[in-house]
Amino acid sequence: MKKYLFIFIYTLILIAGCTYEVSKKSQTLKELPAQKAAKFSQGKQNFKIIPLYEEVLEYTEAVSKKSDLSENDLYADKVIKPFREKITKNNLNIVNDFSEYLAPTRDVQDLKDNSIQLLKRQDDINKAIKQSLLDSSKFLSGGDRTVFVMTANPEWPLEDMNGISAITVSEDFILIQIDPSVTEKHLKYAVAHEYHHTINMEKNSVGSTVLDWVVFEGKGDAFAKLVYPETEVQWTKPIPDDLIKDPLSELKKEGNSSDFQIYNEFIYGNNSKNIPMRANYMIGNKIMQSYFKKNQNAKIEEWTTLDSREIVRSSEYGYLIVN
């Protein structure tokens, strides 16, 4: 199945030191700090943070030189190709076509400016990602994880996503795309959310229906909220029942579908069906919070691996399961 993601009590564990790999800067980027890849571990779990700011800047510079190649070809050569090479070098499992996540933009100057800002902030960004991975792994540990971080396409509407688009591509790695509006607390929350997705994918079959994907996102937010209870995101705030009445009816109707285009309506909204943007997160969170009310002693390991239909049956939303 193609896996889509769109999005306690700490135990004392000995943490190994963090090492950094400084890249070789191209001549064109010599005035900027070199991007840094971080490696660190906690217990038996190893982590890597691999930035792609320089690859994006190589693309923006190539576009400015008005190459004979199309912007799509330049992007494929300067960004997607080295990204794939880094994945292969790190022995990571590739399960998706990256074209839907990585694409050139018409706002090349904004992409360049944003990349420069993020490159200059990379130490704080890496620190936040590292802390989130360490905090998250104290709740649930798993295999080794790699986080790629790069500049988000400036055309994307990320205001309601706190300047972050995060995708768990496989149990091995996460792709975080950010813009300069990102804050430390929201970055840490997003990494925790995606980290739970990797654990879910490692320990459990995610499923292949619209209902599965909605619950999958709900689990991610439930975990991130446990790790960072003080951090607010818009879809975990109290949501009026009227706002999700129609989306819930649509989910009851289409919950067994494996058509990702239907699920996209829950992600991006559908005015004709009165489905608001990010309805998948809203409903997923509602389902999980209802599950917790009825199952107050459920352990993280239990609900992480519990089938989505069992989660729904054990909540007030059991009526969503048609058969």
Image: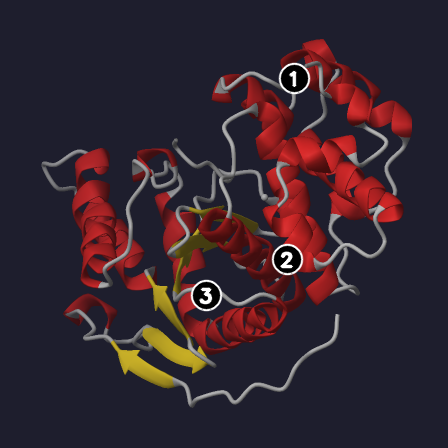
Q: Which residue is found at the position 77% from the left and 54% from the top?
A: 298
Q: What residue type is labelled 1?
A: Asn
Question: In the image, what residue type sits under mark 2?
Answer: Glu
Q: Foreground residue, 252 or 129?
A: 252
Measure the alpha-carbon separation of dots 3 and 1.
34 Å
Q: Nearer the viewer, mark 3 or mark 2?
A: 2
Q: Which amino acid does label 3 sit on?
A: Gln
- Tell me the SS state at disc 2: helix
Residue name at image x 37 percent, y 49 percent: 109
Of 120 and 132, the residue lying toward us? 132
Residue 301: assigned label: 2
Question: Is 82 situated left or right of 216 in this image?
Answer: left
Residue 160 at x, y = what percent? Answer: 67, 43
> Residue 304's x, y, as percent?
62, 50
Q: Indicate the quadrant where residue 86 lies.
A: bottom left
Residue 11, percent across and down? 66, 81
Callout 1: helix, strand or loop?
Answer: loop
Q: Is residue 44 left or right of residue 214?
A: left
Indicate whether 233 appears above or below 23.
above
The first of marks 3 and 2 along the sequence is: 3
Q: Are marks 3 and 2 in contact (CB under 8 Å)?
A: no
Quarter of the image for residue 97 reads: top left
Q: Observer-nearest residue: 190 or 162?
A: 190
Which of pointers 2 and 1 lies earlier in the amino acid sequence?
1
Quadrant where the image shows the N terminus? top left
- At x 68%, y 42%, the residue is 218
Q: Position of residue 308 (x, y in %)?
A: 64, 35
Up the image or down, 79 lies above or below 242; here it is below
- The first of marks 3 and 1 along the sequence is 3
For residue 72, say whether it is visible.
yes
